[in-house]
Amino acid sequence: MSGSSRSFGRRLRIVVLFGGRSAEHDVSRVTAASVAGALDPDRYEVIPVGITREGRWLLAGDAAKALERGDLPAAFDVGGDPVAQLADPGTPHLVPVDTTLDAAAGLRADVVFPVLHGPYGEDGTVQGLLELAGIPYVGSGVLGSAVAMDKIMAKRAFSAVGLTTAASVDHRVGGDRDALRTRVSNELGYPCFVKPANMGSSIGVAKVGAEPELDAAVDAALAFDEWVLVEEMVAGREIEVAVLGDALPEASVPGEIAPGAEFYTYADKYEDGAELYVPARLDGDRTEEVRSLALRAFDACRCEAMARVDFFFEERRFDGSAGRGFLVNEVNTIPGFTPISMYPKLWEASGLSYSALLDRLVDLALDRGERRAGRAGARG
């Protein structure tokens, strides 16, 4: 597999958009530093733009200076000169709100590379803003981002195309807790897992060993989202596949995670606490099966450009009976891009280097931008 074949008459200006209002703010900062450092400076001019936890958009001045010096920090600080919201559909500019900046000049962006993990970034909100502004961006569109981010809606999409998932029940804030306890006992049993519907990096996830622990776990998950998913515990290995492309997406070799804790925690993902096997410990037939399932899950959520599809591989159930094979867990449309993240590792093992992967993603963003600009009504 090769990288980009597109040639440019000038350097493209790539705005790396990071930080954000979600609980994954710090993860996003590390990802942004990795992405910005790997974009070829001969082909791209990188402009880091951070969003504070309060939602304020800032030009990461210190990070930009570090890029020029070649002295890249491990994570970008969200600080520096204020930049404002995206505006003016049809003009590829970020327009400053601060009166000390030249509003006429703005901050031109050829492509925005959002690395905003979690809500307010991975869920279609920023994607909608960029669509309104008419600026090409990396990753899935509004629909794919929103469906994949919401674990409840994603399960419905998987079920609609015949993909197997772990059994679950959902609950909304203010709902009947007695009914929830009854359903969990009757349909799932214990232990089980409680998860916020819209959150990543295992934030807000809790293992519940018995019914008296359920309410506290639900309350903790509701701190992150008003919908909660309660899911059966699966005796399965954790398998991940990276998907890249648009009309004809491709699946990477699968990888496998051996968590350092009872499940794949935040620390495992970003503090190097888990063992990673690339490729996964699967035979040839199982490898091809999970790659095919990953493409089906990608399509079910209407994803574009990139996603990491996560599975449980259940060979045996807890009672020793035959397992169900691969169960789709979730689709991540802005997967981690840190040096220890699975998405770039899987593509590297499939023959595509980190920098070439970024080239492909920029090309896909430009191609989709051109397609959308040519649609009837797109020009106003």
Image: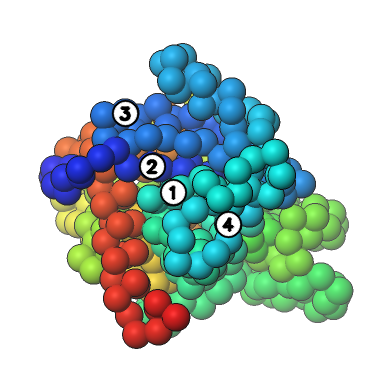
Secondary structure found at label 2? strand
Q: Is residue 6 visible?
A: yes
Residue receiving disc 2: 13
Q: Which residue is mark 4?
A: 86
Mark 3 or mark 2: whose residue is earlier in sequence: 2
> What is the distance, in whole Å, between disc 2 and disc 1 at their CAs?
5 Å
Image quadrant holding the C terminus, namely bottom left
Q: The disc labelled 4 sits on which kind of residue?
A: Leu
Local SS, label 4: loop
Relative to 171, is 223 above or below? above
Between 129 and 34, the residue placed more toward the observer is: 129
Residue at 72% across, 76% down: 183
Marks 2 & 1, CB-CB < 8 Å contact:
yes
Q: Which residue is mark 1?
A: 109
Side of 162 where 228 appears, left or right: right
What residue is rendered at 59% in x and 32% in y? Answer: 60
Amino acid type assigned to the residue bearing label 3 in the image: Pro
Q: Nearer the viewer, residue 310 or 191?
A: 310
